[in-house]
């Protein structure tokens, strides 16, 4: 994949755009994973981006890694729900 790690290029793209790009790349799962990894780095509080990364790892046959990703984001969701109940 081209040097998509360039911060200037990613600055003009939001979370939704990056997610869409990742899903458009699902036939090239390794590239999709890289996009989703960047998205989780840029939006670490978004459960949606974590879920997308976990799904991509599942598609790539990396079940243990997907499980760890899902666990991290499940904990994030629980913390967010607890904050809502305050």
Image: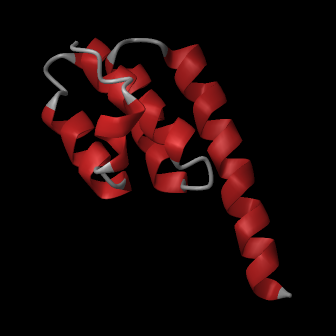
Q: Is residue 84 above or below residue 80?
A: below
Residue at 17% across, 28% down:
25
Task: Give percent across and percent down for residue 69.
Answer: 60, 32
Furthest residue toward bottom: 86
Q: Is residue 2 above or below residue 56?
A: above
Furthest residue toward right: 86
Residue at 34% across, 14% down:
60
Does any portion of residue 27 appear in the rendered image? yes
Quarter containing the N terminus? top left
Q: Is residue 73 left or right of residue 86?
A: left
Q: Is residue 18 left or right of residue 80?
A: left
Viewer-proximal residue among 80 and 43: 43
Residue at 46% across, 53% down:
48
Residue at 20% across, 39% down:
21
Viewer-proximal residue among 33 and 5: 5
Does any portion of residue 50 appear in the rendered image? no
Q: Is residue 21 left or right of residue 39?
A: left
**Total residue callouts:** 0
Q: Is residue 56 above or below residue 42?
A: above
Viewer-proximal residue among 71 and 40: 40
Task: Give percent across and percent down for residue 51.
Answer: 47, 44
- What kind of colouring is applied to the model shown? secondary structure
Q: Is residue 10 left or right of residue 74?
A: left
Q: Is residue 3 above or below residue 81?
A: above
Furthest residue toward front: 8
Task: Give percent across and percent down for residue 7.
Answer: 41, 34
**Quadrant of the image occupied by residue 86:** bottom right
């Amino acid at each position: 994949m081209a040097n998509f790690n360039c911060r200037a290029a990613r600055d003009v793209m939001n979370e939704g755009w990056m997610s869409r790009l990742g899903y458009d790349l699902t036939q090239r799962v390794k590239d999709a994973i890289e996009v989703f990894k960047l998205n989780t780095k840029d939006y670490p509080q978004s459960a949606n981006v974590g879920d997308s990364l976990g799904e991509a790892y599942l598609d790539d046959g990396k079940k243990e890694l997907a499980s760890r990703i899902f666990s991290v984001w499940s904990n994030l969701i629980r913390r967010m729900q607890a904050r809502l109940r305050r």
